[in-house]
Image: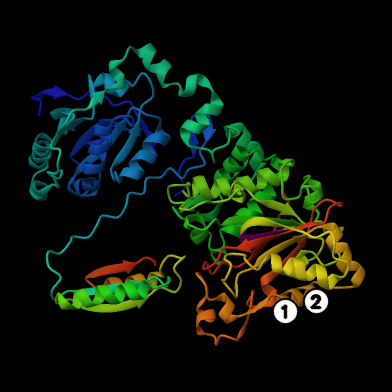
Amino acid sequence: MRPTQNLRAPALSATGVDPASASLDDLTARGAALLVFVSEECPTSMMALRNLGPLCRGWEAAGLTAAAVFEDPLDVALRVARRLGWSGRVLSQAPPYPASRAYGLVTVPTTVLVGTGHAIEGTVVGWDQPRLAALIGRAGELLGGSAAGLGRPPATEPLLKPGCSSKAALDPEIAVAISRPAADDEMEEMFERGWTDGLPVVPPTVDRVAAMLGGAAGSESLGLVPPSMGEATLERVAACAVLAGCRPEYFPVVVAAARAVLDPAFNLHGQAVTTQPAGQLIVVNGPVRRAIGLNSGMGALGPGFRANLTIGRAVRLLATLSGGAVPGGLDRATLGQMGKIGFCVAEDEETSPWEPLHVERGFDRGLSVVTVIGCDAPQNVSDHRSRTPEDLAYVLAWAAASAWSTNWWPLAEPSVYVICPEHAAMFREAGWGKQRLREFMFDAVRRPASELRRGETTPAVHAAAPDTVISKWASPEAIVLLVAGGEAGRYSAVLGPCTGMGSRIVSREVESA
Amino acid sequence: MTAPNTIGQYVSPFDDRVRPPEPLAPRPREIAGRTVGLLDISKNRGAAFLDQIESHLNAAGARTIRWTKEIFSKPAALALIDEIAGRADLVVEALAD
């Protein structure tokens, strides 16, 4: 501990959250304050936060308020503090780091104990466990009574570790210059902030987010986004929609999709963290498709259409950023799939011979509805040769035989078929309704249990007699049928499920803006 | 309370409220005489793993209680967590095969 008694602590110029500003009077109001100056770029700072962080609550209860004073932007500071388990206050200072300068910092971390009358009671530079323990002991003396037992930093190795240069040690102009993210490149700044899915994003400026909200109350909450349970305020959903590249007129669809994926019955929690390649397919039905330019025709599952690509991406960004399902972090997908960037399809209700998905699910045809389904990547099914609905249904059905896994029969979770217009026309001409097609497909894909006992298979297959016939699906209702795609080309697609999630298909009406 | 969400000129997609992890409970030095909850998360062969753990724990003098989560892909129900917390001193959770 540096002998700094009889010095008075300078005023503290820093910002925080709840409250937005900090003063020494606030911090010492309950007795004493421990200021821990840190920087995200400094490993010793991270070590100090990790070791001291869990002690802050106990200190606070005894009258010692701990504050980590970062030489980093506030959002970076908050994220680092959360990650490292720092349970004290979090403060941020902008270049040229006035608080660090006022305290004459050369090194981070530097820990300063401020007592009554703003007297500096001691300072420890770098990570120095014995001196930090003594400093906490000094705080205990100041606070008296029960505070004598204040938690000390653990005597784990290393006991001593030098810190890093404080940014306040730089010339002020240089400090400002080098702190500018990526030399003022706003697009690069988004990557530095982590506000991305790996692709460039549209910076969510206050003005753009306000335009996205269109006057809606940004503080309204749609619920908590798993797995990290960040709150999906409407403002935060709008920020994700801006980042994704949505136009404001898409926002009601994004909100409906967000409400749908946040329904516990959908189990986004499981899908967000699983090793499976689970994506969240968003199906849009109703007049909003045409109103905002959603493509249900040529290339319906592919690139080229802003509304499809950005609506799906907005929902994924909500899960990734607000929900914390960062790939390689809490998102543990072994391979993932491109549909996890965003996956939104509009049904071609005008070409379909059948009732649209939302009507099947109980909504009036004239309503605009979003339906979300947890599913795998699409698998193409080419068939240009079938001349009867039976042949075509057989080909389509067997394409799903290896959905999820080759011998995993039966599947309880839905397989989603996107039927192309030419295939749909064959069923229309033959007068096949959805249910007839489903039942034919269900009956077509069967095998004896003995043929399914290789590698991964289901308990049902293991329990069955060898000659028992097992179906690919648990019921015909596990086959979901949509119509979309270009008018030429006999290519449909099947999307396998994510399994074991107890995930239900969820629909939400799109509320007009 | 809703966190202020504006960072400089931008609206953050992150929920930036600090939610520090819950502190770990103190670790006992001995398990003899303790009650150990064994939580099967309902994933394939998790129970087989717990069977082995259980025999070792019993041999070491611990009592064991078995629980099973409804489904592995969702957080345990609060009622189940409360019950385990009320009846067990320690918990072992089996992840998967």
Between A59 and A490, which is closer to the camera in this rendering? A490
What colour scheme governs how the chains and residues are painted in the rendered image of this protein?
Answer: rainbow
Q: Which residue is mark 2?
A: A436
- Secondary structure found at label 2: helix
Residue found at the very far right of the displayed protein: A429
Q: Disc 2 residue type?
A: Arg
Residue at 66%, 43% in the rendered image: A310
> For the magenta stretch, what is the residue range?
A370-375
Between A146 and A40, which is closer to the camera in this rendering? A40
Q: Nearer the viewer, mark 2 or mark 1?
A: 1
Instruction: Give the side of residue A330 with respect to residue A370, left or right.
Output: left
Between A318 and A156, which is closer to the camera in this rendering? A156
Q: Which residue is mark 1?
A: A443
Quadrant where the N terminus of chain A is found in the figure:
top left
Q: Is residue A352 visible?
A: no
Q: Do marks 2 and 1 share a chain?
A: yes
Where is residue A147 drawn, in percent x and y? 12, 47
Q: Main secondary structure of the magenta part?
A: strand
Residue A98 drawn above or below residue A142: above
Question: Disc 2 and disc 1: Cα gap in Å?
Answer: 11 Å
Instruction: Give the side of residue A180 with respect to residue A481, left or right.
Output: left
Q: Disc 1 residue type?
A: Asp
Instruction: Give the side of residue A84 with respect to residue A247, left or right.
Output: left
- Secondary structure found at label 1: helix
Where is residue A61 drawn, in percent x and y? 21, 49
Determine the chain carrying the residue at label 1: A
Residue at 12%, 64% in the rendered image: B29
Residue at 64%, 74% in the rendered image: A472
Residue A401 drawn above or below residue A237: below
* Label 1 packing within 10 angstroms: few (<14), some (14-19), many (20+): some
